[in-house]
Image (cartoon, rainbow, N blue to C red):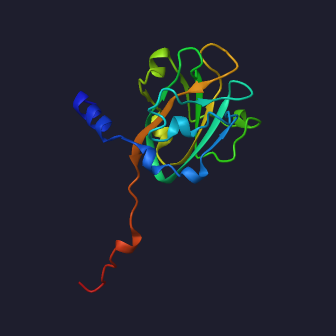
Amino acid sequence: MSAESASAIQRSQVDLLDFIDWSGVECLNQSTSHSVANALKQGYREDDGLNLESDADEQLLIYIPFLQVVKLHSIIVKGPEDEGPKTMKLFSNKEHMGFSNVNDYPASDTIDLSPDNLKGKPVVLKYVKFQNVRSLTVFIEDNQSGSESTKVQKIVLCGTTVETTDMKGLKKIEDGH
């Protein structure tokens, strides 16, 4: 693939924020005063003083449903150098996951976040695994320092919407030409 076509693919990717079904977003083990909205929602996620923070231990399980089918290309995760996420497992179209069964399913992709990634460097995903995504479950397994608390300042999901055929717009082909 030429560098030109690779950059064209990159340019067509958008922030999927407007396609998130906010009524269905859930986060297990979040601190009540530092909820998932701080990392996902526009305005909140740009404020470095706000973050999503784990509660009982370092793990977080975030469920993000979409309003329509999307193709997920990359993810941007910002967090502090020491308490930022390290290992993230992404699951496409897996609903009702909990900490008890998160290891029962193979992850669609596993990401080992570097300090550069935590400063906002995008992580390109295994694109073939994220072609028809109705929901995304993000399991943050641990953090950079192994401490009891994980903090996420920002999560941005980049991709495209899937064009679907409008069946009502199709016209019947007449038999007699």
In the image, farthest residue toward the right: 100
- Quarter location, residue 105: top right
**Quarter in which the C terminus is drawn:** bottom left
Q: Position of residue 83 (x, y in %)?
A: 60, 18
Residue at the spot 62% in from the left edge and 19% down from the top edge: 143
- Quarter location, residue 163: bottom left
> In this rendering, would 100 be left or right of 90?
right
Residue at the spot 51% in from the left edge and 27% down from the top edge: 49
- Count all numbered tags in the image, as a single digit: 0
Q: Position of residue 25 (x, y in %)?
A: 59, 47
Q: Position of residue 116 (x, y in %)?
A: 44, 17
From this view, report whether residue 16 is shown above or below residue 166: above
**Quarter in which the N terminus is drawn:** top left
> In this rendering, would 129 be left or right of 149?
left
Q: Position of residue 44 (x, y in %)?
A: 49, 37
In the image, farthest residue toward the bottom: 176
- Quarter location, residue 16: top left
Judging depth in this view, the residue of 159 and 58 nearest the camera is 58
From this view, report whether residue 58 is shown above or below residue 27: above
Residue at the spot 24% in from the left edge and 29% down from the top edge: 2
Residue at the spot 61% in from the left edge and 37% down from the top edge: 35
Judging depth in this view, the residue of 113 and 168 nearest the camera is 113
Judging depth in this view, the residue of 41 and 108 nearest the camera is 41
